[in-house]
Image (cartoon, grey):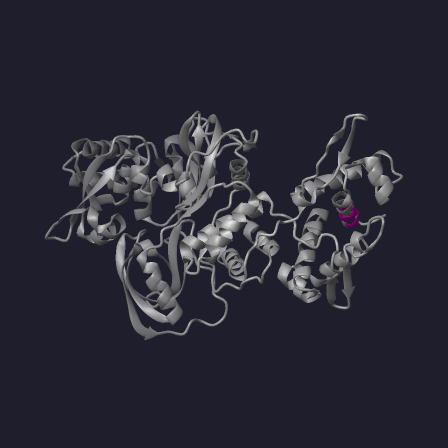
């Protein structure tokens, strides 16, 4: 009996070579594959097709209406990588990108092998990004304008994806959920992602991740914007000034401390930022923000 | 070692054949080296499928593989001589890597950007994918110092000790890991290889002191909190579930009362104080006893600044 890889390879060649879709019986007859073992042969055929599909190969299966028989073919345009038209510098650029960026999964390296050109030995990896299993599914769904369905924060969502972006170590999906544009952290998706019907929606203009979600965590959300005045002691002043920008400094005091002004939309994020600085920071105003911090701290003391 | 599955062997073959075609032939050893596969496996798989052919058995109906001694040649016009199209994972992976490289390295020639446009066009309709990584000014200085092999003097804030310290380091490379920038190098103060978060460098001066990088392969940068490695057990309410996502944990258990039991290593008292202040009154240290009041003591200390005597 032929090796299984040999048999699947011949099946692949046969389905690629045929101009018209062919039936299982024709495969048996023409290819001398799966002959003589009855139901076991049919099962082998099904398993071999599954292997080809697991490699991303699309097998078309039109039904012969007259006989009710399924036919099979692999269209060359669905199999072969189209000519990307890359010049040498572009090929090198992609090879270098795959070498200096490391994903948890080696998807980029597999792709780089296919696009041709010499593998680049990088001086050093310069970026490491997580790669989550749902990302290719969601990315392909957006390409096909197909909504995706998943559980998020205990609720079932049907989302028309508008874009995927990576920031601060996390991947996000931006999309319309019941008509409202929202952002979802992909690692917080709580179920398998199911893809809906392609061509179900239109994109709306150019995608901009910074419009979808502000870079500053203090500005994420729908709340009213207030400008907080925060005193920072001399030990932390230079670091905070560098992180928040010199324009945030509203006052410099003789002891080296500073008062910074920061716009705040997300009060939870603001509280987390201020308390991360511990006793090196004090909220001066507005008074309601100051009171919220005091109440939060008093609750911690009382709980002990 | 277990024999690779039929899927894995076939996937490998479908990549190896076009790769050999692109090079007008390749040595078994080069194929094995490039794909990270034992030479014997390459030879046996290629020898096996070189017999593959389908009716009517002409030259256009074979794989056209010829294995001659240690050379592999694929005849012109053979089937499967071009690569399989990119799957969803590969398409996503290469675009993500390309966008990340653009963000962290820049693209002075513009070639990577046009390559990504062509790649995306080949994949089908546009599917926006952005990698938003900011490149602080210090990265340029650190990269130049690394390339020129000159030491840098830094004032560095150590978060888990809540103190700044002056250090001289011999930079060996910069890395963006999960969104944070790091510089890896020899620390003259510690007398060992260390990794520093770039956003915690308070000042940096490039010196004129040249250094020789250590010989041999460098150990991978050690990322994550340093410190003494004490393990605390916490009861965490669902509202503070971000703690489980944000930090390394040893165990996470959902409890009947809705809370989450978390065992996690901490990098010291300052680290724990920050975590408890952010987590709020419902986050409770269960063990060790000596750290139970850490959050309250920190809160009390801060309240003094606010003039509250709670």
Q: Is residue B14 left or right of residue B244?
A: right
In this view, which residue lies farthest toward the left? A254
Work out whether residue A117 or residue B201 is closer to the camera in this orientation and state it: A117
Work out whether residue A247 or residue B284 is closer to the camera in this orientation and state it: A247
Q: Quadrant of residue A71?
A: top right
Q: Quadrant of residue A74?
A: top right
In the picture shown, does residue B106 fall above or below A43?
below
In the picture shown, does residue A191 fall above or below A118?
above
Q: Quadrant of residue A291?
A: top left
Identify which residue is drawn at 84% across, 44% down: A31
Work out whether residue A123 or residue B204 is closer to the camera in this orientation and state it: A123
Q: Is residue B190 left or right of residue A244?
A: right
In the picture shown, does residue A173 fall above or below B159?
above
In this view, which residue lies farthest toward the right? A36
Q: How many marks?
A: 0
Q: Look at the image and tell me in which quarter the C terminus of chain A lies.
A: top left
Q: Pinpoint residue A214: horizontal percent, then vertical percent.
A: 33, 40
In the picture shown, does residue B134 fall above or below B139?
above
Identify which residue is drawn at 27% across, 50% down: A243
Is residue A15 in view? yes
Residue range (magenta):
A6-10
Say whether residue A205 is magenta.
no
Q: Pinpoint residue A182: horizontal percent, then vertical percent.
A: 40, 32
Give the overall secondary structure of the magenta segment.
helix
Q: Pinpoint residue B60: horizontal percent, then vertical percent.
A: 79, 53
Q: Pinpoint residue B224: horizontal percent, then vertical percent.
A: 40, 52
Q: Is residue B304 left or right of residue B192?
A: left
Identify which residue is drawn at 82% across, 40% down: A27
Is residue B293 in view? no
């Amino acid at each position: 009996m032929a090796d299984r890889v040999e048999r699947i390879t011949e099946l692949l060649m046969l389905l690629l070579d045929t101009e018209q879709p062919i039936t299982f019986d024709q495969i048996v007859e023409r290819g001398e594959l799966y002959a003589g073992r009855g139901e076991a042969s049919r099962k082998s055929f099904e398993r071999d097709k599954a292997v080809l599909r697991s490699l991303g190969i699309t097998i078309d299966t039109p039904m012969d209406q007259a006989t009710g028989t399924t036919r099979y073919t692999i269209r060359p345009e669905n199999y072969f990588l189209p000519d990307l038209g890359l010049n040498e510098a572009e090929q090198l650029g992609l090879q270098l990108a795959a070498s200096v960026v490391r994903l948890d999964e080696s998807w980029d390296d597999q792709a780089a092998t296919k696009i041709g050109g010499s593998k680049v030995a990088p001086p050093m990896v310069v970026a490491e990004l997580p790669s989550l299993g749902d990302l290719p599914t969601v990315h392909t769904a957006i390409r096909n304008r197909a909504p995706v369905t998943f559980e998020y924060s205990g609720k079932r969502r049907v989302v028309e994806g508008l874009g995927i972006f990576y920031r601060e170590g996390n991947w996000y999906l931006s999309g319309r959920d019941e008509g409202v544009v929202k952002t979802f952290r992909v690692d917080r998706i709580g179920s398998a992602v199911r893809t809906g019907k392609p061509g179900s929606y239109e994109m709306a203009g150019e995608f901009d991740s910074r419009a979808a979600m502000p870079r500053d965590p203090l500005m994420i959300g729908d709340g009213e914007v207030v400008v907080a005045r925060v005193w920072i002691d001399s030990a932390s002043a230079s670091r905070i000034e560098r992180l928040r920008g010199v324009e945030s400094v509203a006052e410099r005091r003789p002891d080296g401390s500073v008062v910074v002004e920061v716009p705040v939309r997300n009060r939870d994020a603001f509280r987390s930022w201020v308390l991360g600085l511990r006793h090196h920071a004090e909220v001066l105003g507005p008074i309601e923000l100051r009171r919220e911090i005091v109440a939060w701290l008093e609750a911690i003391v009382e709980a002990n | 070692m277990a024999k690779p599955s039929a899927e894995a062997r076939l996937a490998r073959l479908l990549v190896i054949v076009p790769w050999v075609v692109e090079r007008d032939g390749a040595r078994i050893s080069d194929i094995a080296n490039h794909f990270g596969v034992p030479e014997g496996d390459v030879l046996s798989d290629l020898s096996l499928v070189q017999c593959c052919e389908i009716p009517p058995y002409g030259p256009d109906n074979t794989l056209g593989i010829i294995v001659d001694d240690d050379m592999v040649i694929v005849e012109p016009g053979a089937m499967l001589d071009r690569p399989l199209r990119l799957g969803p994972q590969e398409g996503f992976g290469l675009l993500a890597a390309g966008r990340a490289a653009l963000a962290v390295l820049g693209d002075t020639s513009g070639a990577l950007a046009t390559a990504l446009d062509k790649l995306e066009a080949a994949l089908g309709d546009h599917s926006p994918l952005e990698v938003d990584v900011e490149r602080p000014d210090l990265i340029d200085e650190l990269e130049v110092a690394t390339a020129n092999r000159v030491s840098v003097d830094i004032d560095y804030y150590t978060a888990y000790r809540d103190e700044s310290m002056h250090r001289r380091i011999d930079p060996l490379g910069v890395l963006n890991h999960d969104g944070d920038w790091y510089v890896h190098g020899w620390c003259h103060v510690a007398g060992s290889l260390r990794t520093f978060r770039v956003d915690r460098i308070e000042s940096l001066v490039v010196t004129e002191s040249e250094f020789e990088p250590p010989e041999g392969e460098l150990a991978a940068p050690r990322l994550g909190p340093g410190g003494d490695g004490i393990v605390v057990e916490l009861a965490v309410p669902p509202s503070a579930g971000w703690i489980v996502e944000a930090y390394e944990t040893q165990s996470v258990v959902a409890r009947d009362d809705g809370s989450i039991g978390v065992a996690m290593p901490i990098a010291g008292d300052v680290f724990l104080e920050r975590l408890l202040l952010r987590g709020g009154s419902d986050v409770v240290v269960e063990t060790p006893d000596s750290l139970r009041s850490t959050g309250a003591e920190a809160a009390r200390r801060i309240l003094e600044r606010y003039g509250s005597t709670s």
